[in-house]
Image (cartoon, rainbow, N blue to C red):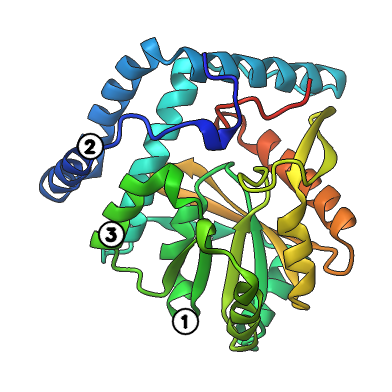
């Protein structure tokens, strides 16, 4: 069983030929046909995925304990369904990035934070986004308003190289620019600051510790359990001197997503991390099977 950190895991079930074949099948037979077979294959792979099943079970135990303690009806889903839900999100990710047609439907969670977010976009004010591995944030590339603004997203290419190369080859969302985390250096901050000043969006994941500096973390609580968030992401966001928002896309049905945003404290990294932890917890409780951290996320 893999009990290490997320960055010690390798891509599973991916391959250049398989991804290109899947995309060809999608273009010929449509998304429902592809998703049916992806669920079948993911179900078969899931039988032998001992590590993923173990951490799915661990997460569900923590989730149910929290739900019971707070008077919430416990969520019931198998590890197999959890893994298949993740596979389903990968298909939507492929469709959002590589299909010119607007297949994915979006509904924003309309509140004060969303209104401020919209106004900042219209005013060409740069926004720093902190995302997580809950839901399907990659589908943001196909959000209707995204064609009017560039999104600079950071990704650990060493962990997702095969899928990353596939997206780079087929993507029709030219306004979404992927920056390898491995290439971060002293000049990156200046470059991102310039992008933000031009009204672009810069996005980093805030729910996985850094592969380069795993010891630099901010302790928080999610679902009443201790866990660690990457200190560098929140300090980097603070240093950009632009508004910071937590962001997530939660699947609500066939090719349908709800976009949720939360304004975070952009003056204090620790406060920002704790507010982001609250945001993650809320998103998790809204869509429990869409927690896609199949590794030892919690300290306990």
* Horizontal side, residue 291 vs residue 41: left or right: right
**Which is more foreground, mark 3 or mark 2?**
3
Reading the image, the residue beneath label 3 is 98
Q: Residues within 10 Å of mark 2 (few under 14, many from 20)?
A: many
Q: Secondary structure at mark 2?
A: helix
What distance separates the C-alpha of mark 3 from that of mark 2?
15 Å
Lower sequence index among marks 3 and 1 = 3
Query: Does the CB distance between marks 3 and 1 fall below 8 Å?
Result: no
Residue 148 vertical position relative to residue 58 in the rendered view, above or below: below
Closer to the chain start, of discs 1 and 2, is 2
Q: Position of residue 91 (x, y in %)?
A: 33, 43
Instruction: Give the answer, above or below, for where 106 lies relative to 151.
Output: above
- Near mark 1 (Cα within 10 A), the count class, few <14, some 14-19 or many ≥20, is few
What is the C-alpha distance between the residues marked 1 and 2? 30 Å
The quarter in which the C terminus is drawn is top right
- x and y percentages locating residue 106 in the rendered image: 49, 58
- Check disc 1 and report the residue beneath it: 148
Residue 240 occupies which quadrant of the picture? bottom right
Q: CA distance from mark 3 to mark 1?
A: 18 Å
* Disc number for residue 34: 2
Question: Viewed as shown, does residue 285 lie left or right of 94?
Answer: right
In this orientation, which residue lies closer to the viewer: 135 or 19?
19
Q: Secondary structure at mark 3?
A: helix
Q: Position of residue 196 (x, y in %)?
A: 63, 81
**Front residue of 232 and 71:** 232
């Amino acid at each position: 069983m893999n009990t290490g950190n997320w960055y010690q895991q390798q891509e599973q079930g991916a391959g250049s030929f398989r991804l290109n074949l899947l995309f060809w099948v999608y273009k010929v037979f449509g998304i429902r046909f592809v998703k049916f077979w992806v669920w079948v294959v993911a179900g078969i792979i899931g039988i032998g995925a001992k590590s993923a099943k173990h951490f799915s079970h661990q997460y569900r135990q923590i989730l149910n304990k929290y739900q019971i303690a707070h008077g919430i009806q416990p969520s019931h889903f198998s590890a197999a369904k959890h893994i298949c839900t993740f596979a389903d999100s990968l298909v939507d990710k492929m469709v959002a990035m590589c299909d010119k047609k607007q297949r994915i439907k979006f509904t924003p969670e309309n509140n004060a934070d969303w209104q401020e977010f919209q106004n900042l976009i219209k005013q060409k004010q740069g926004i720093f986004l902190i995302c997580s591995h809950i839901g399907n944030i990659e589908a943001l590339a196909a959000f209707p308003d995204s064609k009017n603004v560039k999104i600079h997203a950071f990704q650990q290419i060493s962990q997702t190289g095969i899928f990353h190369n596939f997206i780079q080859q087929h993507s029709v969302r030219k306004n979404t620019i992927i920056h390898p985390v491995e290439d971060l250096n002293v000049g990156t901050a200046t470059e991102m600051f310039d992008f933000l000043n031009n009204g672009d969006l810069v996005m980093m994941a805030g729910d996985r510790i850094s592969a380069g500096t795993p010891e630099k973390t901010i302790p928080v609580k999610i679902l009443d359990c201790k866990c660690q968030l990457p200190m560098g992401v929140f300090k980097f966001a603070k240093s950009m001197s632009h508004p910071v928002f937590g962001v997530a896309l939660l699947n609500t049905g066939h090719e349908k997503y709800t976009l949720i945003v939360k304004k975070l404290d952009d003056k204090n990294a620790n406060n920002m991390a704790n507010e982001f932890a609250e945001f993650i917890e809320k998103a998790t409780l809204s869509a429990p099977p869409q927690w896609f951290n199949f590794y030892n996320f919690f300290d306990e």
